[in-house]
């Protein structure tokens, strides 16, 4: 741990770092991980794009659960790990942040140049007319359409989904696009079974190829969506460092692996690389 921390410190102190962050960075903000040691396995299968768009009942279930889960996600605040990343960025050591998280917490913590690989949960898109609206606006409309909808939230998942009994789902009324009037609304996040927009992927690859090093924070790299950047960096001879609790599927490509809680390690790291003080409150 001490040796790998020193290697990590030297790597970050050299600058030119591109960060790739995952759910593990947000667990300390109260957003549970899918697969990390602090997280339990999901109790239900994540919504797929195919089920969402083709099955009205699945869609109703998604919006009913998400209507509740959203408030918990919206109330989450960045943690010491997010603030340390922003501090490293303001110190000029981290150039860009690619995140697999849809919670927007890097931006709230003060990070700039953030590529949100899987989109943002606080934006909603109409699949028919393409109109983008805020989740706040949708939240207001859903509350108006469901004035009596009250449910106990048992658990919230990283995509803002919660567990909810069927009878409460049945009572929920989703709404359509307020702009074109009939279009199907979807949170502007990449669902399972959906591909990331190619231009966004290209921006990520370009960022990785410009990097002096790639620093993975809190991702088990289980899905290729994030792992491909690690593979690309390794192929280009760009050093990869991984900080995660537990092994990852990218460990074989990494030059440094540190198993530590991010909310502890990142502030320590930021404090040891030339006065990069965490920003934000
Ligand atoms: Zn529309």
Image: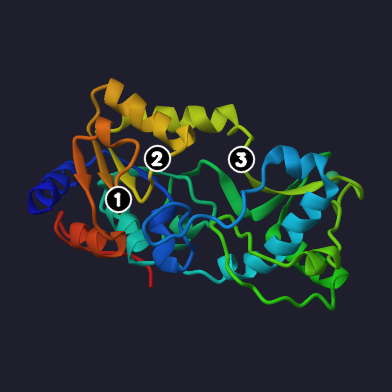
Q: Residue furthest right?
A: 181
Residue receiving disc 3: 192
Residue 278 screen position, x and y as percent: 29, 64
Q: Quadrant of residue 279?
A: bottom left
* Disc 2 crowd, CA 10 A, few/some/many (<14, 14-19, 20+): many
Q: Which residue corresponds to mark 1?
A: 246
Q: Could you tell me which secondary element the residue under label 3 belongs to?
A: loop
Residue 7 at x, y = what percent?
12, 44
Residue topped by disc 2:
221
**6 up-or-down from 255: above or below:** below
Asked if ligand 1 lies within 8 A of label 3, the reply is: no
Q: Is residue 8 left or right of residue 114?
A: left
Work out whether mark 1 precedes mark 2 in sequence or the reverse, and give the earlier one: 2
Q: Position of residue 37 (x, y in %)?
A: 36, 58
Estimate how packed mark 1 is, as few (under 14), some (14 to 19) or many (20 or more) residues with alpha carbons within 10 Å. Answer: some
Sequence-wise, which precedes: disc 2 or disc 3?
Answer: 3
Ligand 1 falls in quadrant = top right
Q: Nearer the viewer, residue 60 or 19?
A: 60
* Cα–Cα span, label 2 and label 3: 15 Å
Q: Is residue 85 above or below residue 208?
A: below
**Is residue 207 visible to us here?**
no
């Amino acid at each position: 741990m001490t040796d790998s921390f020193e290697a990590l410190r030297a790597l970050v102190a050299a600058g030119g770092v591109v960060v790739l962050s995952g759910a593990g960075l947000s667990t300390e903000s109260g957003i549970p991980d899918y697969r990390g040691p602090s997280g339990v396995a999901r109790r239900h299968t994540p919504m797929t794009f195919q089920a969402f768009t083709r099955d009205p009942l699945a869609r109703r279930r998604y919006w009913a659960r998400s209507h509740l889960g959203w408030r918990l996600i919206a109330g989450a605040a960045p943690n010491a790990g997010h603030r340390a990343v922003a501090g490293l960025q303001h110190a000029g050591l981290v150039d860009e942040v690619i995140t697999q998280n849809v919670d927007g917490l890097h931006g709230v913590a003060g990070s700039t140049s953030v590529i949100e690989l899987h989109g943002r949960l606080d934006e909603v898109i109409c699949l028919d007319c393409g109109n983008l609206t805020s989740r706040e606006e949708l939240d207001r409309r859903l509350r108006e359409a469901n004035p009596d909808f009250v449910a106990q939230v048992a658990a919230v998942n990283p995509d803002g989904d919660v567990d909810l009994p069927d009878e409460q789902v049945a009572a929920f009324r989703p709404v359509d696009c307020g702009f074109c009037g009939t279009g199907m609304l979807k949170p502007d996040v990449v669902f399972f079974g959906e591909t990331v927009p190619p231009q966004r992927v290209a921006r990520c690859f370009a960022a990785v190829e410009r990097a002096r090093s790639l620093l993975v924070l809190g991702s088990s790299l289980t899905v290729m969506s994030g792992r491909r950047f690690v593979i690309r960096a390794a192929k280009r001879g760009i050093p990869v460092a991984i900080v995660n609790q537990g092994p990852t599927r990218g460990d074989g490509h990494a030059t440094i692996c540190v198993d530590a809680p991010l909310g502890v390690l990142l502030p320590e790291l930021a404090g040891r690389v030339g006065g990069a003080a965490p920003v934000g409150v």
